[in-house]
Image: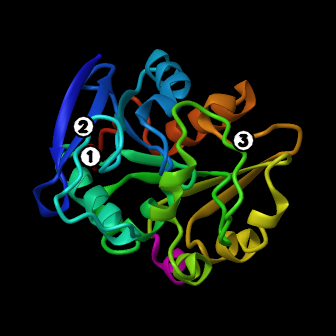
Amino acid sequence: MSVVDYKGFGGVRLSADQLGDDNDPAVLLIPDAGQSREAWRDVAEALVLSGRRVVSLDLRGHGQSEWPRERRDELAPHIEDLRAVLAQMGSRPPVVAGRRGGWVAAQALAVDGAHLAGGLVLVDMPVDECPSIDGEGRDFDPSALGAFVPGDIKAQLLEAAPRVAVPTLVVHGGLGPAACTAGSAAFDAALPVGERVDNDDADMAFAAGHTEAFLGQLLEFLEGGSPREATLFQAGSD
């Protein structure tokens, strides 16, 4: 594992762990506000064992990433940060995965997303505002969630969904807070290339609680859209 830095919006330094072989297809993991990149550790290690390069990012103001001098508790800088990081990750677009980090990822990929990412995975992403939180998971600070609660997240996500032009896997856990999923059906239906998977007996609330079933679904999605061996196209002969 190595630590890499990216230049985010406004020149803010964003820190990330990089795991796996540089030649393997990449997955970019986005934590929630209030979490560091450690929240995805279990998933990152499993992905590496399955032949993926993993970049696990700290959001601005979290973990080892820096805050700008003018602090802005809103989504817009995070969205631009993600677009900047994706543009610096090389020629083979990565698959992006997140939970509340999906609020950032979905909007970031709604503009020229196919040039930035090869796919999107949304894990129990609340589509409606969700002020309550159970506080489980690694390194979680509920006070930081304010940066991830814009005025009308549902309207923003429903506007972004039809423009997310990358294959998208939406995973829902049956034990997630029902109050936070009322808008999920509309969002899922609006995705141009979307696949929904329900894990009725699993709690997908935080990365640390991911199940083997979820990892199997994730790897199946990754192999379908971003296989380890890039497809070679050769001109046919007459």
Secondary structure type for disc 1? loop
The magenta region covers: 159-164
First in residue order: circle 2 vs circle 1: 2
Q: Amino acid at mark 1?
A: Ser
Q: Nearer the viewer, residue 163 or 71?
A: 71
Residue 237 numbered mark, or none: 1
x, y (%) of residue 122?
A: 58, 53
Structural crowding at the residue carrying mark 3, measured as other residues with C-alpha within 10 Å and reported as few (<14), some (14–19) or many (≥20): many
Q: Check whether the beta carbons of the residues at disc 1 and disc 3 lie within 8 A of each other.
A: no
Q: Is residue 100 above or below residue 21?
A: below
The quarter of the displayed image where residue 72 is located:
bottom left
Residue 204 numbered mark, or none: 3
Q: Nearer the viewer, mark 1 or mark 3?
A: 3
x, y (%) of residue 212?
A: 71, 25
First in residue order: circle 1 vs circle 3: 3
Q: Nearer the viewer, mark 2 or mark 3?
A: 2
The quarter of the displayed image where residue 25 is located:
top left
Mark pair 2, 1: CA separation = 49 Å
**Could you tell whether 110 is left or right of 206 in the image?**
left
The residue to which callout 2 is attached is: 15
